Amino acid sequence: MCINKPIGVKANWDKEAQVWVATSDDVPGLVTEGETLEQLVKKLQIMIPELLQANGLLGEDEQYEIPFRLLSERIGMIKCEA
């Protein structure tokens, strides 16, 4: 089976914890973090199918292709002197 609509995942930089925090309105219960976006993607590749199955949105004995879109945002400051 193939899921055509990409799962939306948002990642925001937590300055205090120094990690990316990911959440999704499309995957109930999805909250995870990673020190890098690459680390975060690896966690998402495991967690998304597990949570979809746990929430009864995927069958357990089938294989799926699940597209996802990761949107990241990081706000920073640049100090400059005139």
Image (cartoon, helix red, strand yellow):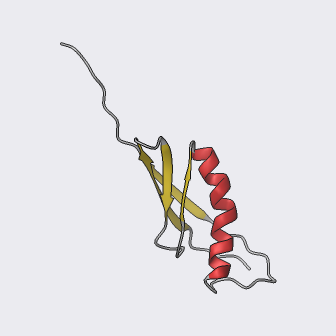
Q: How many marks?
A: 0
Q: Position of residue 73 (x, y in %)?
A: 41, 48
Closest to the observer: 34 or 3? Answer: 34
Q: What's the residue at 57%, 46% (across, down)?
A: 37
Q: What's the residue at 63%, 60% (across, down)?
A: 44
Q: What's the residue at 62%, 84% (across, down)?
A: 57
**Residue sitting at the far top:** 82
* Location of residue 61 (image quadrant): bottom right
**Residue sitting at the far right:** 61
Q: Is residue 18 left or right of residue 55?
A: left
Q: What's the residue at 50%, 45% (across, down)?
A: 19
* Location of residue 4 (image quadrant): bottom right
Seen in the picture, residue 55 relative to 66 is either above or below; the reply is: below
Closest to the observer: 20 or 71? Answer: 20
Give the position of the N terminus as an image quadrant: bottom right
**Residue sitting at the far left:** 82
* Location of residue 50 (image quadrant): bottom right
Give the position of the C terminus as an image quadrant: top left
Q: Position of residue 25 (x, y in %)?
A: 46, 72
Q: Is residue 77 left or right of residue 64?
A: left
Seen in the picture, residue 4 relative to 55 is either above or below; the reply is: above
Q: Position of residue 27 (x, y in %)?
A: 54, 73
Seen in the picture, residue 5 relative to 42 is either above or below; the reply is: below
